[in-house]
Every structure is written in structure tokens, then in C-alpha cells.
């Protein structure tokens, strides 16, 4: 067996990360944040139509343009007068090329999985204005300003739209060109750094968390920055919603919603407006953080969506997707779906928000279906009555919504971490021991994941019993979900990289030159090629190894080459 052979491939695409020393490509900084900015208007003959895309040379396919048009306007049932903000998510066309200028690896490497750039979807953030206007044939001015990005930074981009949209509706295209040029001067999104983002006389200050930070921990103290004029508007988060506001009418069902998200169940959210629809879907997805939700989710979905037929067919089981809708027509369409959350305008019962009830799916028949959670689902774990009591008491005491959200987010985070911890512990037991890592042998294999073996470990080291219930049943159901599949693939890739790193360290610690003394030239050349391949793979896949380790390996290769005859040295230096 070849001592340095390692055929385990590292999954995932890889591109060279952009370095700070490169000359900026036009629109490269803009593209690090946004794909494009669109203006969608209502044309009497064409219906919704894209009036403007900036930068002008951005390449959207016709399918993407059509989707953006329909998703950028509330449907007629919402009755949105004035200004409305909401978001959507759409599937990218197959075969489109990336325009991130090679920066996705360096960003995604350091960002939490829940905030990484999307490979196959765009996020759209909409500012829609509908006001009476006698000069327009229909009697109304209707237009949307849309920011399209691969980044799930809802809080940041909706804040950006609040600054630029009102100004754009007054001054039109020249204003938009100025804004895009300003964004093209922004620093690149780097997790862990405080970033000042100036636009139209306002400076938004943000900080993207890193993957090594404890989610829900104390905010990292910001370094003192230069005295900025104007003083920056500090956004506490680039992505977090007001979780408590989103869940006010379903607080007593939070445990059920968390389980439905954890298991990747098909869910439809029927809401009175795109704002409520999109915020509720995004809030649901966030309940299982720091786990990434690996099913599809559409914060706002319409009958014109290109996936409408795919998601509403009755010939097969509903897919693992969360859909946010506002059109009552969907009640009839989604009658075969197992979980439907019907929301209305918030109603109060005294000084507390009225809680919706769980109802049988059979009652979901008419267009005027009442609010409720229509499902036959029975939770594996019991409700946390203390949490619900604490939140309801907080409403009576007029506790600020952001504090209520922090309490709720902390509870959900601890519950998810408690669920994941035994899985993480079991994964560690599958890793080969470090002492078995020999420079003279192929790296040992990671043992396969066995569900039955994992279940046995729960008897000794199960989840911290935050809640009582059937944890074993919940794990067995989780193993069949897309979230388990996504989590395991990611962790297995990280473990494979860890084995690669340990093997590299073992090679660098070995006396390679001595090993070559009694070897033939063919064996030595083979060794050099294998070492070079390892070096290339380490750099290409950005393995978490120190640069000095790679430099030491490079020096070892050069030392071995210099011990060979000159003709071979020349040949190897050419390669």
C-alpha cells in the first residue's frame, strides 16, 4: 500500500478565495452583497413588468425575471395600501453562472451555516408602494423596489430599502444609480468584523456573526471606531426577526412548530398579507438554529410561481417545503397537505393576544376558513408551560418585544442544542483515534453512522431533559428528514477534513528524507507527486491547517527533490 495515498475526496465545490490584494473588478463589491436591484411596475397591458434592473448588465433569465415580477406584488386579496415590505425566495435557473467573483468560499467558510450564501436560490426583499394617483389610468400608483441577494440578511436589506425606496419613488433612476455605486464601495461581508455601510447620507453599522461564536451568547464587544459623521445606525442583527411578534397568536403551540421544522414537515402558512406570510415562514425556519433548515421554503408564494404545479400535484405526497401564501384559493389547493397554519389579523383577549386553536384538517374546506393550526400531528415532547407563562406574564407587564423575543429564541436554541448534543457526541466516537494516524499508511476511515448504535448511547447520555416526552421517537423521525441528511453530510465533510489535517500533521512530523534513503527513484518520484497532491488539496479545499505546516511540507518536498539526480530535479521543477 502506498504510504501517502488518500483517495477520500472532499465534497463540495471549491474556488479560489478572492484576496484583498486583487484589483477590484467592476461591481465586485456590489456583487459580494447583492445580485441586483429591480424596479417592478404595473403595466395595464402587460401586468407586472420589470421597468429597470441595476447594474444594467446583470444577467437574469426570463424565468427569473417573470418570477421576480409576480413575487414583488401583493396579490389583490391582501389589499395593501401605502407602503408594504416583505420578502421572497426563488429557485435560480439551472446552469446559471455565479457572479460572486470567487468570494463565496472565504465568506461561507467563516459564516454560520444558517447565514451562508445560497448556491441555488435568490432572496428577494421588497418595498411595495400603492397610493391613489389620479394621473394613472387605474387610479393607483403601484410600484416595487426589489433587492435581490444570495445572502439571507432580511433585517439589513429591509433597513436598506427603508432608506432608499422613499427617495427612489420621488427621484427615480439617477437616485438608484447613485445608491448602487455607493454599495459598490462597501467593504466585503466578512464574518466577525464591524462593517460600516454608507448609503444616501446614512451609515448602517452591522456585524455578521462567525460560525465559532456561541449562538445566543452575549453580544461581542465592538471595537472603538473612528468618529463617523453622521453617527452610524447600529443594526443589532443582520438577519434576526422579531420572533415574539411573529408568534404572538401561536405561543402555546411553539413546541409543535419547533418539531414540525426539525422534522422538515410540509407546512403551508396562510396569512392576511405578504408581510405576515414572509415573516412567519422565516421565523419558523429560524426556530431550529443553529441547525440549518435543509428543506425548501418560500416566504411568499403565488399561483404564478414556476414551482406551483410541482408543489400542488396530488399524485404524490407533499414535498418537504414551507410555503407562505395569501390567496384564499390555496385553501382548496392544499387540502391534502398535513399541516396548515391559518393566520388572521391579531386579536386580543383582554390584554393578551388571542391564541389560535389546533383543528382537524377536515374542517379546512371553505374560503372563509377560520384561523387555526389544521393538523393531526401529535408532539413527541410536552409543552414548556413555564415558558408560555413567562411570555404571557411579560405581555401583561409590557415587557419590550425584543426582550420577549430573546427569551423565546434562547429557549428554542437550548432545546435544539440539547437535541443535537448526543448526535455530536456519537459522531466524535466515529472518528479514528489520533494515535492510529501513521504517515506510512492510508488515513484510517471514519466509521459509518449506525442509528441503532446511536439509540443505545441515549441510555447513558441522552439529551438534557429540558422537556419530558418521547425523545427516542423524535430522533427516529428526525433520521428520515432532510435536516438530518443535510446536517450529517456537512459534519461528515468536516470530519473528513479533520482526518486529512491529522494525516498531514503526521506526515510533516515524519523524517521523510531518511525514508527515501533505501527507496528506488520511481518510489521517490511517486512520493513527491503524492505529497504535492496533498499540498494542492489542502490549499484548494482550504483545510484548517496552519500555513507554517504547509510551508514545512513544501520544504520537505524541495529537500527530497534536491537529493535526486539533476535530470530528475529539472523534470520535477517543471511540473
Image: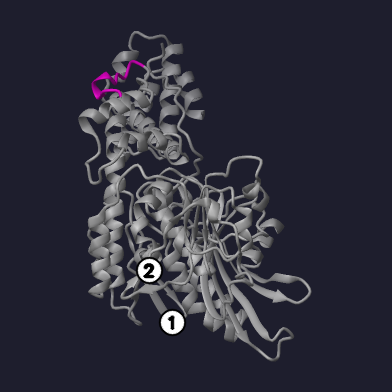
Q: Name the foreground residue: 303 vs 63.
A: 303
Q: Select label 1 or label 2 by which is in front.
A: 2
Residue 136 seen in render = yes
Q: CA distance from mark 1 to mark 2?
A: 42 Å
Q: Image point 53% across, 69% down: which residue?
A: 272
Label 1 belongs to which residue?
201
Marks 1 & 2, CB-CB < 8 Å contact: no
Residue 112 seen in render = no
Q: Name the foreground residue: 145 vs 453.
A: 453
Q: Secondary structure at mark 1?
A: loop
Q: Residues within 10 Å of mark 2 (few under 14, many from 20)?
A: some
Label 2 belongs to which residue?
354
**556 over 230 or under it: above or below:** above
Q: Name the foreground residue: 191 vs 540.
A: 191
**Residue 300 on the magenta segment:** no
**350 over 237 or under it: above or below:** below
Left or right of 119? Residue 402 is: left
Image mark for residue 356: none
Q: Quadrant of residue 395?
A: bottom left
Q: Quadrant of the N terminus?
A: top left
The span picked out in magenta is 432-441
- Indicate the colouring scheme: one colour
- Residue 54 appears at what percent x and percent y? 61, 69
- Residue 540 appears at what percent x and percent y? 45, 38
Q: Earlier in the sequence, mark 1 or mark 2?
A: 1
Amino acid at each position: 500500500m502506498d504510504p501517502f495515498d488518500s483517495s477520500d475526496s472532499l465534497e463540495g465545490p471549491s474556488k479560489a478565495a478572492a484576496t484583498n490584494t486583487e484589483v477590484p473588478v467592476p461591481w465586485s463589491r456590489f456583487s459580494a452583497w447583492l445580485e441586483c436591484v429591480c424596479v417592478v411596475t404595473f403595466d395595464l397591458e402587460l401586468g407586472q413588468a420589470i421597468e429597470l434592473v441595476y447594474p444594467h448588465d446583470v444577467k437574469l433569465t426570463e424565468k427569473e425575471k417573470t418570477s421576480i415580477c409576480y413575487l414583488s406584488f401583493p396579490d389583490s386579496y391582501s389589499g395593501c395600501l401605502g407602503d408594504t415590505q416583505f420578502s421572497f425566495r426563488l429557485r435560480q435557473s439551472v446552469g446559471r453562472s455565479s457572479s460572486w467573483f470567487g468570494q463565496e468560499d472565504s465568506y461561507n467558510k467563516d459564516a454560520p451555516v444558517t447565514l451562508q450564501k445560497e448556491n441555488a436560490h435568490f432572496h428577494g426583499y421588497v418595498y411595495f408602494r400603492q397610493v391613489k394617483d389620479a394621473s394613472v389610468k387605474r387610479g393607483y400608483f403601484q410600484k416595487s423596489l426589489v433587492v435581490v441577494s444570495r445572502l439571507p440578511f432580511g433585517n439589513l436589506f429591509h433597513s436598506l430599502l427603508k432608506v432608499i425606496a422613499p427617495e427612489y419613488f420621488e427621484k427615480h433612476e439617477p437616485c438608484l444609480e447613485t445608491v448602487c455605486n455607493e454599495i459598490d464601495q462597501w467593504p466585503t461581508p466578512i464574518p466577525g468584523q464591524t462593517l460600516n455601510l454608507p448609503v444616501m447620507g446614512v451609515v448602517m453599522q452591522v456585524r455578521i456573526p462567525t460560525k465559532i461564536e456561541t449562538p445566543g451568547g452575549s453580544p461581542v464587544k465592538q471595537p472603538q471606531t473612528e468618529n463617523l459623521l453622521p453617527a452610524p445606525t447600529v443594526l443589532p442583527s443582520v438577519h434576526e426577526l422579531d420572533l415574539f411578534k411573529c408568534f404572538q397568536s401561536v405561543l402555546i403551540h411553539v413546541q409543535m412548530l419547533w418539531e414540525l421544522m426539525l422534522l422538515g414537515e410540509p407546512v403551508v402558512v396562510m396569512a392576511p398579507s405578504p408581510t405576515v406570510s414572509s415573516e412567519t415562514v422565516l421565523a419558523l425556519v429560524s426556530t431550529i438554529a443553529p441547525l440549518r433548515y435543509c428543506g425548501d421554503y418560500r416566504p411568499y408564494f403565488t399561483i404564478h410561481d414556476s414551482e406551483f404545479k410541482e408543489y400542488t400535484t396530488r399524485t404524490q405526497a407533499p414535498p418537504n417545503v414551507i410555503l407562505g401564501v395569501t390567496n384564499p384559493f390555496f385553501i382548496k389547493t392544499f387540502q391534502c397537505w398535513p399541516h396548515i397554519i391559518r393566520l388572521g389579523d391579531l386579536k386580543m383577549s383582554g390584554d393578551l393576544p388571542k391564541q389560535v386553536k389546533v383543528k382537524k384538517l377536515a374542517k379546512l374546506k371553505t374560503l372563509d376558513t377560520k384561523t387555526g393550526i389544521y393538523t393531526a400531528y401529535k408532539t413527541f415532547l410536552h409543552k414548556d408551560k413555564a415558558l408560555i407563562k413567562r411570555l404571557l406574564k411579560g405581555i401583561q407587564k409590557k415587557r419590550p418585544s425584543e426582550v420577549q423575543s430573546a427569551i423565546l429564541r434562547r429557549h428554542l436554541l437550548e432545546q435544539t442544542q440539547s437535541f443535537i448534543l448526543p448526535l455530536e457526541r456519537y459522531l466524535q466516537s466515529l472518528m479514528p483515534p489520533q494515535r492510529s494516524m501513521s504517515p506510512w499508511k492510508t488515513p484510517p476511515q471514519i466509521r459509518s453512522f449506525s442509528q441503532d448504535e446511536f439509540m443505545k448511547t441515549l441510555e447513558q447520555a441522552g439529551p438534557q431533559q429540558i422537556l419530558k416526552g418521547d425523545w427516542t421517537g423524535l430522533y427516529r423521525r428526525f433520521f428520515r428528514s432532510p435536516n438530518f441528511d443535510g446536517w450529517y453530510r456537512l459534519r461528515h465533510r468536516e470530519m473528513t477534513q479533520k482526518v486529512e489535517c491529522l494525516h498531514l500533521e503526521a506526515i510533516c512530523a515524519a523524517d521523510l528524507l531518511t525514508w527515501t534513503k533505501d527507496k528506488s527513484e520511481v518510489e521517490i518520484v511517486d512520493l513527491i507527486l503524492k505529497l504535492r497532491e496533498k499540498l494542492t488539496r489542502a490549499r484548494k479545499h482550504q483545510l484548517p491547517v496552519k500555513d507554517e505546516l504547509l510551508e514545512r511540507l513544501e520544504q520537505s518536498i524541495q529537500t527530497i527533490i534536491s537529493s535526486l539526480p539533476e535530470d530528475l530535479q529539472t523534470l520535477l521543477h517543471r511540473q
